[in-house]
Amino acid sequence: MWVAVLGSADHVFPTHREHGVAMLMGLPVERILGVFRGAEMGDWDAEELRFHYYSMVIGAHTLHGVGYAMGQARDAASGRDANPGASVIFHGDGAISEGDVNEAYIFAATYQAPAVFICVNNQWAISEPVERQSRIPLYQRAWGFGIPSVRVDGNDVIAMHAVTSWALDRARAGAGPTFIEAYTYRMGAHTTSDDPTKYRPAEQSEPWRVKDPIIRTKAWLRSAGVWDDAQQAQLDQESEKLGAQIRSTAERLAAPALSEVFEHVYAAMTPDLARQ
């Protein structure tokens, strides 16, 4: 539902977690899996999809996104493009400690770039609680850069849709950047090698279990009379089919040849690379 707020010229700059947005914008799931399996370079056509490359370097993509947004602003000012769009830039709460991210805020505010920052605050940067990184709520940090900001319930699909739509309208109208803090919680481990019981009590996450966005959205749709058991059964069946398809695709991914590492570095192979 979130992707529905994007216009035909808006671009998304993801971290390495926005798989749902990627699929909704047309990126085949095997390409996403290929990146994490080390089976491909992740060099899809970002201009065509309007979904840019996954960033494994925490926060580095925020500068790319703001740079693109500055270009969109120049296109709008020159009249060269009647609908240059805006840029949506995702990052997590841990990324706020990165210099790149703070520099991105500075450039966005200074040049009034049509950028929408969505900070997914799950309250844990691996094992560090967000309170160790910021003495104030994250959305208030944006004020120091001159960026309007808001904290929203990140587990409320309708609220996220509304606030993102508002921020994108501001950006497209030339009002500059907006910072959205999507306040949520990381229920499980940070990675498969992480053990959250080492640094937080298990009961701390329990109150968040009932706030699961899927459960809440389903309850809301049922109360509105637009969702029933038959529709749920059909969705469950489709989900199982999609899961089987994704697992099958992952199993078929082949390791790339070593030479492929060099193929997309230059338009034509250089003598130095050829020797290597």
Image (cartoon, rainbow, N blue to C red):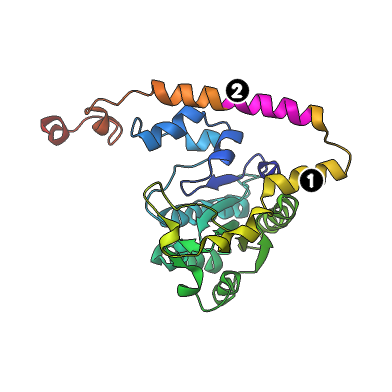
- Tell which of 175 and 247 is nearer to you: 247
Q: Which of marks 2 and 1 is nearer the N terminus?
A: 1
Viewport quadrant of the C terminus = top left
Please report the residue visible at 74 percent of the width from the left and 55 percent of the height from the top.
Answer: 159
The answer, for residue 184, to whether it is visible in the render is no
Q: In this view, does 237 lie above or below 8?
A: above
Viewport quadrant of the N terminus = top right
Q: Give the range drawn in magenta.
A: 231-242
Give x and y (percent) for residue 153: 68, 60
Disc 1: CA contacts within 10 A as few (<14), some (14-19) or many (>=20): few
- Tell which of 171 and 128 is nearer to you: 128
SS at circle 2: helix
Give x and y (percent) for residue 124: 49, 62
User: Is residue 8 on the magenta stretch?
Assistant: no
- Residue 163 is left or right of residue 114, and the answer is right
- Residue 133 is left or right of residue 82, and the answer is left
The residue labelled by disc 1 is: 219
Count of marks overlaid on the render: 2
SS at circle 1: helix
Give x and y (percent) for residue 17: 50, 46
Magenta: main secondary structure: helix
Please report the residue visible at 18 percent of the width from the left and 33 percent of the height from the top.
Answer: 270
User: Hey, what amino acid is under mark 2?
Assistant: Lys
The residue labelled by disc 2 is: 241
